[in-house]
Image (cartoon, rainbow, N blue to C red):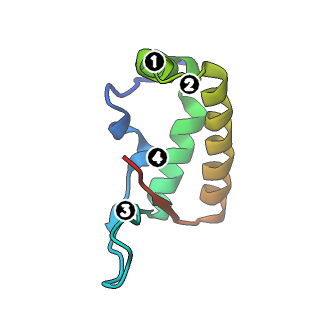
Amino acid sequence: MPSVQTPTSPGNLPIYGGRPVLHSADANPSDPPLMLLEPPGVSQAAQFLTTVSFDELWNVVEARFSALGWTKQEHLEHHRDLQEFYGQAASAGHAVVKAVWA
């Protein structure tokens, strides 16, 4: 498999795409922002997650995440969960709504 170019900023990852969804006027101001990733974006994220090397991604974030006490194994498990979730959503033609915490 050819090497996949990895982004230099995690914000460039397809799973972080989408457009903001505004909260209602009576929403709690502490609620996290919501993002809507339309079905084409979900398919792009699913394809990215199945083709990118986890080790390449880890190499980009290892120093920062390790300093926070997060292990490679923990993130490998999250990566696999994301592969499954986005793969199923893409196969069904679904959009994804997600909360975004900074």
Which type of secondary structure does the marked residue at label 4 adopt?
helix
Residue on which the image places disc 4 = 15
* Residue type pointed to by label 2: Trp
Asked which quadrant contains residue 75, the reply is top right
Residue on which the image places disc 3 = 33
* First-in-chain label (3 vs 4): 4
Label 3 and label 2: CA atoms lie apart by: 24 Å
* Residue type pointed to by label 3: Pro
Residue at 35 percent of width and 84 percent of height: 26
Residue on which the image places disc 1 = 67
Label 3 and label 1: CA atoms lie apart by: 26 Å
- Image location (x, y in percent) of residue 40: 46, 58
**Quick one: label 2, few (<14), some, or many (20+) residues within 10 Å?**
few
Label 3 and label 4: CA atoms lie apart by: 15 Å
- Image location (x, y in percent) of residue 54: 57, 24
* Residue type pointed to by label 4: Ile
Q: Is residue 16 above or below residue 2?
A: below
Circle nearer the viewer, 3 or 1: 1
- Image location (x, y in percent) of residue 80: 67, 36
Residue at 48 percent of width and 48 percent of height: 44
- Image location (x, y in percent) of residue 36: 42, 64
Residue on which the image places disc 2 = 70
Residue 3 in view:
no
Circle nearer the viewer, 4 or 2: 2
Describe residue 86's horizontal placement relative to residue 13 as left or right: right
Which type of secondary structure does the marked residue at label 2 adopt?
loop
Which type of secondary structure does the marked residue at label 1 adopt?
helix
Residue at 68 percent of width and 55 percent of height: 88
**Quick one: label 3, few (<14), some, or many (20+) residues within 10 Å?**
some
**Quick one: label 1, few (<14), some, or many (20+) residues within 10 Å?**
few
* Residue type pointed to by label 1: Ala
